[in-house]
């Protein structure tokens, strides 16, 4: 079971670079901010990432962008001579940046869960959890969904078209 940590507490953690977190299948949801940071880092348009590096599912009229997997590994995971590395590390999605700490909800900024699958937990020094990244994550998720809901439910945009508009607007200024 995942432990919950609150502000003020520290946790022992060191990343063992085992890539377990990047090998559990394509399950990382992306905001438009994540996609624009990756596109800027790779020097390509978000349109060139679509399909190849992320795909979109539509649930209840809401488009959700998800990192693609190659088999059971993330499409951005490089494995060379038994060493695993994220090929977009400086621009990896916020969910990846936070891991093994995980948001409890899209608005909670004083508590986080600690993943029980990460073997680096309980090792190394006591560290402060990444509260600043959690605050950024909450701001971006709120902004992403409020802009998306406005386009879809107030302006009657088709869900995919709404995501496209949002990506065009966000990537232009980021
Ligand atoms: S599962 Fe934990 S120890 Fe392994 S790479 Fe991910 S964060 Fe690091
Ligand atoms: S984007 Fe990078 S850190 Fe995130 S799951 Fe893929 S390889 Fe791992």
Image: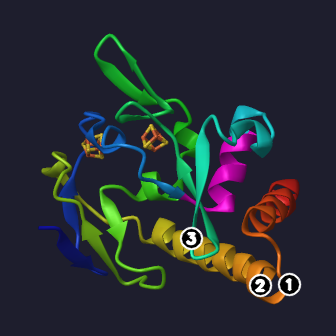
Residue assigned mark 3:
136
Q: Secondary structure at mark 2?
A: helix
Please tell me which residue is depicted at 83% across the width and 81% down the height of the picture: 156
Range of magenta residues = 30-40
Is 87 or 27 nearer to us in this picture?
27
Instruction: Answer whether labels 1 and 2 touch (C-beta < 8 Å).
Output: yes
Sequence order check: which comes first, mark 3 or mark 1? 3
Quadrant of the frame with the C terminus: bottom right
Sequence order check: which comes first, mark 2 or mark 3? 3
Residue assigned mark 1:
155
Quadrant of the frame with the N terminus: bottom left
Image coordinates of residue 92 in percent, x first then y, are 54, 46
Q: Is residue 124 visible?
A: no
| Residue 164 to residue 113: above or below | above
Quarter containing ligand 1? top left
Is 56 or 97 nearer to us in this picture?
56
From the viewer's perspective, is 46 left or right of 128?
Answer: right
Please tell me which residue is depicted at 81% across the width and 54% down the height of the picture: 171
Sequence order check: which comes first, mark 1 or mark 2? 2
Image coordinates of residue 98 in percent, x first then y, are 41, 59
| Residue 73 to residue 5: above or below | above
From the viewer's perspective, is 43 left or right of 85?
Answer: right
From the viewer's perspective, is 167 left or right of 49?
Answer: right
**Does label 1 point to a residue whose CB lies under 8 Å from ligand 2?**
no
Report the mark closest to the observer, 2 or 3.
2
Question: Residue at the top extreme?
Answer: 81
Within-10-Å neighbours for mark 3: few <14, some 14–19, many 20+: few
Residue assigned mark 2:
150
How far apart are the two marked residues, 1 and 2, measured between alpha carbons? 6 Å
Is 117 part of what is drawn in magenta? no
How far apart are the two marked residues, 3 and 1, measured between alpha carbons? 27 Å
Chief secondary structure of the magenta span? Answer: helix
């Amino acid at each position: 079971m995942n432990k919950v940590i609150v502000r003020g507490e520290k946790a022992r953690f060191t990343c063992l670079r085992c890539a377990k977190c990047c090998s559990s299948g394509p399950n990382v949801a992306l905001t438009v901010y994540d996609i624009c940071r990756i596109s800027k880092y790779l020097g390509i348009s978000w349109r060139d990432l679509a399909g190849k590096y992320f795909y979109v599912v539509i649930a209840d009229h809401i488009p959700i962008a998800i990192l693609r997997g190659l088999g059971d590994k993330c499409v951005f995971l490089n494995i060379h001579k038994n060493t695993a590395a994220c090929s977009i590390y400086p621009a990896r999605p916020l969910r990846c940046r936070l891991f093994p700490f995980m948001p409890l909800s899209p608005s909670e900024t004083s508590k986080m869960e600690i993943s029980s699958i990460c073997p680096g937990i309980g090792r190394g020094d006591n560290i402060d959890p990444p509260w600043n990244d959690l605050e950024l994550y909450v701001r971006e998720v709120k902004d992403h969904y409020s802009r998306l809901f406005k386009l879809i439910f107030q302006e009657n945009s088709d869900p995919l078209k709404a995501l496209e508009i949002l990506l065009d607007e966000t990537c232009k200024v980021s």
